[in-house]
Amino acid sequence: MIELGRQFGLYSIAEVISTTGGFVSCLAQDPFFNRQVILKIFSCQGEKGEAILAPLEKQLEILAELDHPSIAPIYDFGLEETDIYFTSSPYYGGSLLEQMQGRMPAERVLKLAAELAMAFDYAHEHGLKQGKLLAEKIFFDAEGRAVLTDFSLDRFIKSFNAAAESGDKTEEQGDVAETLFSLGELLLHLRLGPTCDFTDGRIEDLVAEISEPQLRKLIGRFLLPGEWRFSSFADLLDELANFAELTSLVRERTLSKQRGESSGDALAEGLELNDAEHREQAVVEIRRLVAEKNGLQQSLEEAVSRRDLAENKLLEEARELKAAQAELSKVQEEADVAWELVAAQKNSRWQPTGWAAGGFVLGLLLTGGLGYYLNDQPRTQLLAELPLSEVPNPAHKPPAEVSGVAQNDSEARELSPTDSDSVEVAEAETQLQEPPAEVLAQQQDQTREPLRSGTNFALVAEAEAAYEVAPAEEKPPSWWPAGNEFSAAAAIPLEQIKVALDIEQQASRSALPMDMQRELTTAIKSWAASWSNQDLQNYFSHYSDDYQPELGRSRTEWQEMRIARLSKPQWIKLELEDIRLRQLDKDRVEVKLKQSYRSDRYADRILKSLNLVKENGQWRILLERSLGKLSG
């Protein structure tokens, strides 16, 4: 596989064009002349490759000496590891194979035949043979002239491989005849177009379809067995000279050949005269070119080395950037989780239940204080106005049904009077102090004397028993205190508090049927398992269509966030414990649980609240809130 940008000598590959005849053809940049060239690469791997290397280099040296407009020049050749390469001129006029898609005019067919015949004649004089012609190896230059590329190289590689397999070095025979016959087939195909088919063996019928007699006779000498065949390319050129369209072209070739022979003779004479001087100049020029090429090669290698260092540095920086982005993403996820926890804790402080409880306690305080003020102040004034003789004896407590005011004396002493009632309360306390012993004795005598004069003693005993102090039984209070200081008037029955706080209804709702508990537990564990398995489809199926995320997110934003958090970790492990269920409505249940989350990216342990609603016989999540982070 040839990579773009790879260097072969001085040349950098810009585009891979084709692979034919063992050669890989590429478009490359020549930095020495600042031009584009065709770079052709032949692999010399293995034993056959090593054996063909030296003969192929010799063949390229011969081709590099050719100078003909219809033969592609060889600019440079060399060896890169196990690949031999050479460069040639690019031709943008298209190939002959593309021209064969339609009928070619007779004049152009004759011109093409003359140009190729002159090229073959020139090469044959230099000892080179072509063999069979291939349409994909013939291109057209900017002036429309036919040009032979890879001249004789395909035949050379084919002959070498055949000799290597047979073990004999045989001479090639019939090369000129093979080239002439394949040239005739090309001319016939170009004139008749795609309908020309040689497979059925009717060459005579195909030649007869040519409407131009002179051209039909010319092609017949190429292909028909009974005709007088061309013996050489010079013979072919002599025949082409009889065509009026080619007279000037063939004569120009003859004149140029004559000029070449005369100039060659003159050059030979000059070389004989100044052989030593010319040789010395040639050696100096060659050395200069070689030194310049070596310098460019060294500069190129240094540039390639610097480029490799820069690429390695870019790759390292790209890896560091990727790692930093991954770390930033992890931090962002942790920040999102932290914001969720903070928002959940903030919202939990301001729930409507908290507001209701606060308002209820405040109402208790206000009601208790007002009741204390309204009930205790008249009692204090009443005690202050009583005469001393009517003050009840504190040593004997009357029955509850007889003296309801005296029961609150101890409470009156415990209460702290307000500033406005300080004088009246002090007077009442003075009156409530125990009288002297003489007064007590006189009162007792006065009380007992009527009893001795025939009073019903049963009634007296019953009254005295009522005055005895009985031990107080401890009973649970049926009221709830409003504060440290309170009175009986400020007491609120406990039943009313339970009704207000919905305690009894909550207790009744917490008891769920066993079947419902199993359904809910199964649904919650299935939800946790789909989260642990990173099964997105099953995970989202546990949420209600009416699910509303928190933090002001839309359903789409929440779903995208959950997809990212379930997909990014390599593994997730979710554990649930202490699952508590409470029924809110017929088809709605509140769940509180402890959730332990671990992955390769993050871990936490939180208290979570879920509201599940029954939809189409399935329990699905309607609300999901975090109640705070747990320690441990």
Image (cartoon, grey):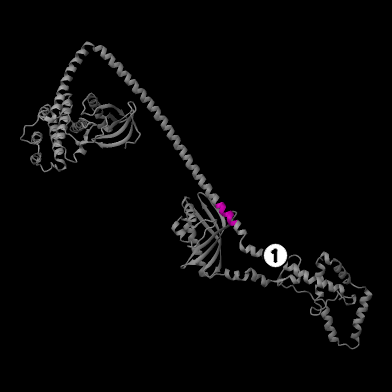
* Quadrant housing residue 467: bottom right
The span picked out in magenta is 337-345
* Figure check: 82 above or below 557: above
Task: Give coordinates of residue 62: x percent, y percent.
Answer: 22, 24
Closest to the observer, 568 or 455? 568
Residue furthest left as drawn: 226
Is 340 part of what is drawn in magenta? yes
| Count of numbered labels shown in the rendering | 1
- The residue tagged with tag 1: helix, strand or loop? helix
Residue at x 67%, y 64% (from the top left corner): 359
Q: Nearer the viewer, residue 192 or 281?
A: 192
**Three-letter amino acid code of the residue under disc 1:** Leu
123 or 594, which lies in front? 123
Q: Is residue 392 above or below residue 553?
A: below
* On-image quarter of the N terminus: top left
Residue highlighted by disc 1: 362
Tell me what residue is drawn at x 91 percent, y 79 percent.
444
The percent position of residue 69, horizontal first and vertical second, equals 21, 27
- Kindly tell me whether residue 173 is visible in this rendering: no
The quarter of the picture where residue 67 lies is: top left
Q: Is residue 290 left or right of residue 584?
A: left
Q: Residues within 10 Å of mark 1 (few under 14, many from 20)?
A: few
Q: Position of residue 505 (x, y in %)?
A: 60, 71
Indicate whether residue 507 is drawn in magenta. no
Q: In the displayed structure, does residue 146 sit left or right of residue 386?
A: left
The outermost residue toward the top is 273
Classify 417 as above or below 64: below
Main SS type for the magenta part? helix
Query: Which residue appears at 86% of the width and 67% of the height?
Result: 423
Residue 90 seen anywhere in this rendered image of the structure: yes
Residue 257 is situated, as x and y percent measured from the top left of the image, at 16, 22
Instruction: Name the residue nearer the viewer: 296 or 619.
Output: 296
